[in-house]
Image (cartoon, helix red, strand yellow):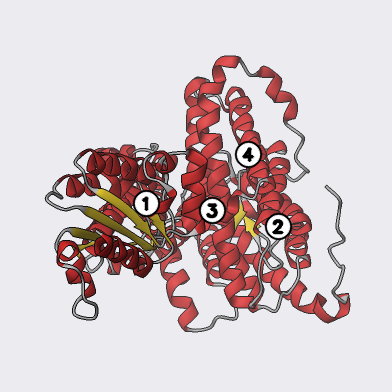
């Protein structure tokens, strides 16, 4: 893939100040978020920092959204945490031995994301039903919030969502200092913006709560030491894998790859709305895939386009992809100069910050609408939420999409059936034309409004079987945009049945696409002759009237 200079077409002097301001603020916000997501994943705070730095730079170079900021994100971290848990379970709880499986999963996910970008699968994200997306994000938010309950109480996180709920009943003691700091961090994130927005409330919460813990020498769990040197490549660890490990790698890798596409492109849409620009979905996904591959190779988490950092970047005046690159560089400098102090950050403070992140992910708009939307949409939302919480994210999206599709097919089938008009020729023509008596009540007219597809086929076949006592049927297709194979086969079966019963069939108004389909599959031409096809309904009626007069 040819490298395209990132500064091309844009005068550096005219946009550099805005890009630098946006990058600086995005890096400030990214620091606590990267630490928190790294801890939640189970790989440690440094894993989040590696991703926040490497992914931002690589995606800034090759990405297709000018102002996109890439970081570890809530949805990606939730899946990454399950991968880490699986790796530890398969290695007896030893992180060193679990790393090859974790690394292979993250690298395969990045490769898949690259391929999704190459083939531009991102264009299909716009077909994601809103109830599926809303229920999915609500589930992600609930998982993130639940995962912070034990850290805020000063305890170790017992595992997944269901395990957390079960373990709550066994809590015997808590660390009140940790709980107090966690509650304070949440309060600061929500309340400080009411005083001023000049300083990011997440950063203030992190710094102030850490200073309180250090000054008063509170006995609370802390992050601990993080590496000061650059990470080493981990690719050689892949040689330790066995074929049997693939069963634990492929499914979460597909999940991470697909989720990375969705997460990044949704953020790109937000950026488009704020900047009045249009992102390149293909290059955006390619940039994310390349960045995630390099981040994983150095021990980082999978990440994606981050809405909070992107919005901050844009509001500070950023206009070009340079801002994403600068954000990664600035964060690297911040980490290099503050590593000695980061180790004092209480875990409960990071937990409090992530509670606010989880709450922001939940689609409150969708929840407010839940009791006012169609029951099918509410059912889809609920199904996706429950599967997200108690199963896994890939199944949640797949089941939600299937459920939403089935509900849609049922609605379309009912709509097409209700819009179908079946009346005698005299009823259709009214008093505007005189119809010979032998045609008026002996010719039946069917008029359709919408596509004839598999969801409609069975209902149509049942309806047509009841038509009796007529000489002919005119099928009006002026308002039928297309027919799928099920529609064509059903129509052929119905026409064959009518002709066996001595009912002549005429088709009017079929468009070129439908006629071409008939010709290609050689279905209807073998059942009714070309003289039974008419361009217009009126032409067919005139022909029938002429035949009646001759008789």
| Nearer mark to the viewer, of 4 and 1 | 4
Q: Which residue is mark 4?
A: 112
Label 2 to label 3: alpha-carbon separation: 42 Å
Residue drawn at x 77%, y 64% is 326
Dot 1 corresponds to which residue? 139
Cα distance in 3D space between marks 1 and 2: 35 Å
N-term-proximal mark, 3 vs 1: 3
Question: CA–CA distance between discs 4 and 3?
Answer: 16 Å
**Tags 2 and 3 touching, CB below 8 Å:** no
Viewed as shown, does residue 61 lie left or right of 485? Answer: right
Q: How many marks?
A: 4
Mark 4 or mark 1, earlier in chain: 4
Residue 405's spot in the image, x, y percent? 35, 50
Residue, far bottom: 195
Is tag 2's residue or tag 3's residue first in the polypeptide sequence? 3
The answer to which image quadrant residue 180 occupies is bottom left
- Provide the residue designation for mark 3: 124
Give the alpha-carbon distance from disc 3 to disc 1, as whole Å.
22 Å
Mark 2 or mark 4, earlier in chain: 4
Q: CA distance from mark 4 to mark 1?
A: 24 Å
Could you classify mark 2 by the number of other residues whose Cα lies within 10 Å: few (under 14), some (14-19), or many (20 or more)?
Answer: few
The circle drawn on residue 52 is none
> Tag 4's secondary structure?
helix
- Which residue position holds label 2? 338
Say whether residue 385 is left or right of residue 276.
left
């Amino acid at each position: 893939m040819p490298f395209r200079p990132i500064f091309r077409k844009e005068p550096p002097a005219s946009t550099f100040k805005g890009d630098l301001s946006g990058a600086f603020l995005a890096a400030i916000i990214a620091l606590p978020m990267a630490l928190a997501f790294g801890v939640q994943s189970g790989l440690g705070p440094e894993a989040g920092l590696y991703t926040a730095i490497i992914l931002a730079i690589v995606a800034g170079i090759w990405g297709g959204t000018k102002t996109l900021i890439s970081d570890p994100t809530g949805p990606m971290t939730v899946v990454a945490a399950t991968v880490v848990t699986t790796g530890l379970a398969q290695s007896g709880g030893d992180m060193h031995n679990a790393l090859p499986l974790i690394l292979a999963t993250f690298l395969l996910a990045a490769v898949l994301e690259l391929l999704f970008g190459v083939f531009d699968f991102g264009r299909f994200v716009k077909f994601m039903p809103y109830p599926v997306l809303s229920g999915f994000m609500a589930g992600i938010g609930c998982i993130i919030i639940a995962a912070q309950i034990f850290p805020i109480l000063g305890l170790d996180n017992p595992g997944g969502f269901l395990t957390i709920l079960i373990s709550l009943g066994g809590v015997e003691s808590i660390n009140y200092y940790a709980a107090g700091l966690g509650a304070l961090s949440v309060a600061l994130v929500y309340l400080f913006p009411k005083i001023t927005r000049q300083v990011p409330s997440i950063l203030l919460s992190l710094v102030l709560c850490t200073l309180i813990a250090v000054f008063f020498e509170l006995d609370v769990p802390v992050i601990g030491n993080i590496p000061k040197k650059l990470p080493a490549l981990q690719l050689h660890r892949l040689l330790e894998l066995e074929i049997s490990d693939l069963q634990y790698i492929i499914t979460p890798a597909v999940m991470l790859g697909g989720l990375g596409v969705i997460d990044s492109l949704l953020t790109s849409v937000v950026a488009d709305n704020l900047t009045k620009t249009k992102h390149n979905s293909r290059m955006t996904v390619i940039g994310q895939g390349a960045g995630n591959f390099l981040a994983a190779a150095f021990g980082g988490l999978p990440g994606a386009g981050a809405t909070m950092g992107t919005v901050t970047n844009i509001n500070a005046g950023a206009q070009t992809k340079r801002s994403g690159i600068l954000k990664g560089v600035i964060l690297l400098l911040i980490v290099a100069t503050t590593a000695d102090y980061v180790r004092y950050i209480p875990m409960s403070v990071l937990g409090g910050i992530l509670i606010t992140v989880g709450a922001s992910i939940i689609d409150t708009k969708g929840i407010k609408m839940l009791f006012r939307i169609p029951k099918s949409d509410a059912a889809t939302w609920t199904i996706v939420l429950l599967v997200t919480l108690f199963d896994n994210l890939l199944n949640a999206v797949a089941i939600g999409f299937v459920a939403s599709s089935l509900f849609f097919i049922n609605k379309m089938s009912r709509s097409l059936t209700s819009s179908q008009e079946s009346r005698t020729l005299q009823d259709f023509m009214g008093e505007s034309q005189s119809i010979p008596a032998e045609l008026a009540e002996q010719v039946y007219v069917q008029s359709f409004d919408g596509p004839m597809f598999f969801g409609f086929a069975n209902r149509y076949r049942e309806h047509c079987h009841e038509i009796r006592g007529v000489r002919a049927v005119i099928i009006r297709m002026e308002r039928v945009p297309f027919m799928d194979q099920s529609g064509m086969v059903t129509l052929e079966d119905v026409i064959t049945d009518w002709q066996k019963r001595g009912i002549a069939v005429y088709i009017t108004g079929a468009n070129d696409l439908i006629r071409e389909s008939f010709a290609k599959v050689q279905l209807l031409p073998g059942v009714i002759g070309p003289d039974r096809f008419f361009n217009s309904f009126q032409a067919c009626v005139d022909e029938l009237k002429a035949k009646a007069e001759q008789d």
